[in-house]
Amino acid sequence: MAYPMTMTRRAALAGLTALAAPALIRPRAAFAGTGQAFIQPRLNEGRIEGGRRVFDLTVAPGLHEFRPGIATETIGINATFLGPILSARAGDALRMNVANHIGEPMTLHWHGLHLPAAADGGPHQEIAPGAVWSPEFDLMQKAGTFWFHGHQHEKTGAHVWAGMAGVLRVTDDEEAALPLPRTYGEDDFTLVLQDRRFDADGQMPYTMNMHDRMAGMQGDVLLVNGQTGPVLEVDTPLIRLRILNGANGTFYGLHFADNRTFHQIASDGGLLAEPVPMQGAILSPGERAEFLVDVSDGAAVMLRAETFGAEVAMMGTSGTRDVMEIRPRGVRPTPTLPDRLAEIPPPPDATGEDRRFDLAMTGMGMMGDFTINGRRFDHSRIDFAVPLGTTETWIWTNTTPMLHPMHIHDVQFRILSRNGIPPSAQEAGLKDTVLIRPQETVALRLSFSDYADPVLPYMYHCHILEHEDAGMMGQFTVV
Ligand code: C2O
Ligand code: CU
Ligand code: CU
């Protein structure tokens, strides 16, 4: 199944919902649009100390008011839910001081960053309760939207569900030279999309039923940076939305209520070659995209998400939810978009091995395990070693009836093909997470440079966090 990328929302979802049965989860009214003003989390630029940009991140339990007057137990990073938006420049030397105040072991992983395995924050960089972990590394990225989140062995789902995640906004000279909106909180907004289930007491316990184990945790309340139904008032004709799908197991089919065309300008690892027009975009858990939205007509418009889980081909979507209303203040002349954004060279030639990854389920139907090449994750087993300095081809085949967004640490990779067909424009740039649909074979090209470690591995895994925690993960070293 290949998806043309200039597509309508219906076309985008048609392939996924071809066998749709009635939805299992229906939105409730309780949290319906509160109409509160969109609050952009504060930008945190850290502090400069001895030539390094230093960020102090305290991870601690919190009480967050998702609904006025109701305190929900959470985990936050310098906040009561989620973390700050960190801002840094490509090339910065960073130090992250991560303090664990949650009373149990945790890790904090820098999703999308190219860095030494010892600084990665995966399951091998456990931070004991009360300890501070201070990795130092260079920020070797293009301008883009990255993120960080808990990655404790078998606790990733629970920690992220509670709020252990934040965003890293990277700037560089190439991006700064383009005529794009980039004034934070004025025409450039960061949205962390998640959904949660709340119980009668307003708490969001991480308790999974059988469906959650199979499909990933999904909720009926859609959150934007922890807010429900915010309203964003804007004064500029063109706005930039940097969107992270920070959900545990939910896919979002983003579109506007009036089906207006918008443009994607960046994928996981940075700018695309040129703005790509679309009326709908699917974001899988872990993926980021940046969009330009023309609001010069002055009309209020609702950003919406069709929400669905890994089992969409069997279960259908769980409906369409309002994400955020955008209210322009006044009519403005129509903005022009840049024709070109970034130089995206063709994928590098392979110099190393081809590796195959078979995504499967073992055991009895709904009771089975998710496996990669027939194996579940084993913390003490390195699945393979990649020679430093090589470029490899990784070929993923999904024989399960479910969607799996596969993520690889350390690299920004390129998609070569989906079932033999070259990627669409919006998937032709830098990626670290790629959706693999049932019966699909997706080929990736990855270069392993700069950092080797004979012992400490990087992870590759499904970014449905319940699949990851259940063992749909492997690890490789670069040597
Ligand atoms: Cu976003 Cu291994 O994670
Ligand atoms: Cu990652
Ligand atoms: Cu999966």
Image (spheres, rainbow, N blue to C red):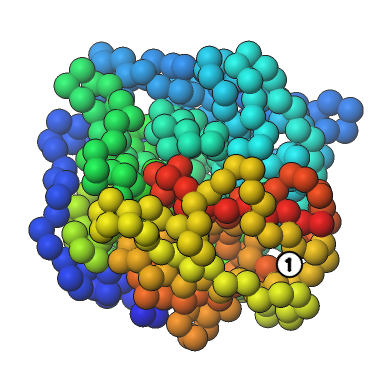
The three-letter amino acid code for the residue at tag 1 is Ser
Q: Residue at x 63, y 52 (%)?
A: 475
Task: Kindly give the residue lying farthest to the front in the view shown.
Answer: 363
Q: Residue at x 42, y 69 (%)?
A: 398
Q: Residue at x 55, y 34 (%)?
A: 152
- Residue 381 x %, y %: 64, 48
What is the secondary structure assignment of the residue under circle 1? strand
* Occupied quadrant, residue 281: bottom left
Q: How many residues crowd around disc 1 within 10 Å: few (fewer than 14), some, or many (20 or more)?
A: many
Q: Quadrant of the C terminus?
A: bottom right
The answer as to whether callout 1 falls within 8 Å of ligand 2 is no
- Residue 315 x %, y %: 19, 59
Task: Kindly give the residue lying farthest to the bottom in the view shown.
Answer: 420
Q: Quadrant of the N terminus?
A: bottom left
Residue 312 relative to residue 216: left or right? left
Q: Residue at x 33, y 62 (%)?
A: 402
- Residue 316 x %, y %: 19, 61
Total marks placed: 1
- Residue 325 x %, y %: 29, 45
Is residue 466 visible to the viewer in this orientation of the structure?
yes
Residue occupied by mark 1: 447
Is residue 297 visible to the viewer in this orientation of the structure?
no
Q: Image height check: is 388 above or below 230?
A: below
Residue 385 relative to residue 164: left or right? right
Q: Image height check: is 378 above or below 342?
A: above
Q: Image height check: is 241 above or below 92?
A: below
Task: Kindly give the residue lying farthest to the right in the view shown.
Answer: 50
Residue 325 relative to residue 288: left or right? left
